């Protein structure tokens, strides 16, 4: 009897399918409300969803939108990765060292309260309108959020489990992978998911102010032309990509590292 594999929790598959269905239905409801507002009031500044989708397809077919989407995704990927790595390291260091935390806590609080727009403008003024300034501005804006999250994760580590590992003479690598890191997973995932949502918004502002490519640059151009349909088309395209990353990468990772809770 002991060698019989444990069946999955009853209803877990239905709950997963139900959650996905609800997310899709919520988006469909939003589109229906959008279409209903257009049909009822015919506002001149809110094009119908069908018009936005048609403009989206046309822009993708010309290749212009794809180029700018890839430019923005490249900037998001670079800044997101650097912010997550540096912020995690800084947060763990502050969480485990009271002296380091006392020295850096004031600076971290300052960076958290400086508006993103101010940081972006200063970086462009100090270092010029170039790619390095754009990436640096985004990293400076996101790094403090990651550091604060991981600092709390480091403080929440159960040291009793580490003492047990020491008694059983586990290797440092095994102790880190099997005991220390799993306790940080919720904080790492929280930093990653909130970071993705924040980074791409800051990247768009950076592109709007000081770049000659990317979705933000295109939004600025279409704003000058007062082309609401194109603005919504570009917004929809990039939001769809970020949503796909969230649903196709971050959510599966979260379910995988949290699978022990379902046992």
Image (cartoon, rainbow, N blue to C red):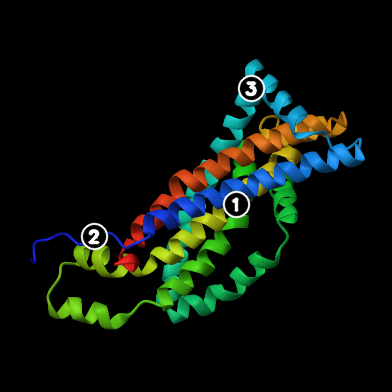
Q: Which residue is mark 3?
A: 60
Residue at the top extreme, as displayed: 62
- Corner quadrant of residue 145: bottom right
Q: CA separation, marks 3 and 1?
A: 23 Å
Q: CA separation, marks 2 and 3?
A: 46 Å
> Does label 2 or label 3 sit earlier along the sequence?
2
SS at mark 2 in the image: loop
Instruction: Determine the residue positioned at 29% across, 67% down.
Output: 263
Residue 84 image offset from top left, x and y in percent:
48, 55
Q: Which residue is mark 1?
A: 197
Residue 85 sits above or below residue 238 on the image: below
* The one of 234 and 2 positioned closer to us in this rendering: 2
**240 lies left or right of 262:** right
- Whether tag 1 and tag 2 are in contact, CB under 8 A, the answer is no
SS at mark 3 in the image: helix
* The one of 50 and 97 positioned closer to us in this rendering: 50
* The one of 50 and 246 positioned closer to us in this rendering: 50
- Whether tag 2 and tag 3 are in contact, CB under 8 A, the answer is no
SS at mark 1 in the image: helix
Instruction: Single out the mark in the foreground, 2 or 3.
Output: 2
Instruction: Single out the mark in the foreground, 3 or 1.
Output: 3
Instruction: Determine the residue positioned at 38% across, 67% down.
Output: 184
Quarter that holds the N terminus: bottom left
């Amino acid at each position: 009897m002991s060698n019989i594999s444990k069946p999955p929790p009853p209803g877990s598959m239905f709950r997963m399918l139900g959650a996905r269905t609800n997310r899709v239905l919520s988006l469909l409801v939003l589109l229906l409300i959008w279409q209903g507002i257009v049909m009822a009031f015919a506002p001149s500044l809110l094009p119908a969803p069908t018009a936005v989708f048609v403009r989206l397809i046309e822009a993708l077919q010309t290749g212009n939108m794809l180029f700018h989407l890839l430019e923005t995704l490249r900037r998001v990927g670079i800044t997101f990765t650097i912010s997550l790595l540096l912020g995690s390291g800084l947060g763990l260091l502050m969480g485990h060292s009271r002296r380091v935390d006392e020295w850096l806590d004031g600076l971290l609080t300052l960076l958290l309260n400086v508006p993103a727009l101010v940081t972006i403008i200063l970086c462009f003024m100090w270092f010029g309108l170039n790619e390095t300034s754009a990436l640096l501005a985004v990293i400076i804006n996101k790094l403090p959020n990651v550091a604060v999250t991981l600092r709390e994760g480091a403080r929440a580590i159960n040291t009793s489990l580490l003492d047990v590992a020491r008694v059983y003479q586990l290797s440092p690598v095994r102790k880190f992978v099997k005991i220390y890191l799993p306790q940080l997973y919720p904080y790492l995932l929280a930093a990653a998911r909130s970071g993705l949502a924040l980074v791409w918004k800051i990247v768009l502002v950076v592109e709007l102010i000081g770049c000659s490519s990317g979705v933000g640059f295109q939004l600025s151009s279409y704003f000058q032309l007062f082309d609401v349909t194109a603005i919504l088309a570009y917004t929809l395209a990039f939001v769809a990509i970020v949503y796909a990353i969230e649903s196709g990468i971050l959510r599966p990772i979260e379910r995988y590292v949290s699978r022990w809770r379902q046992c």
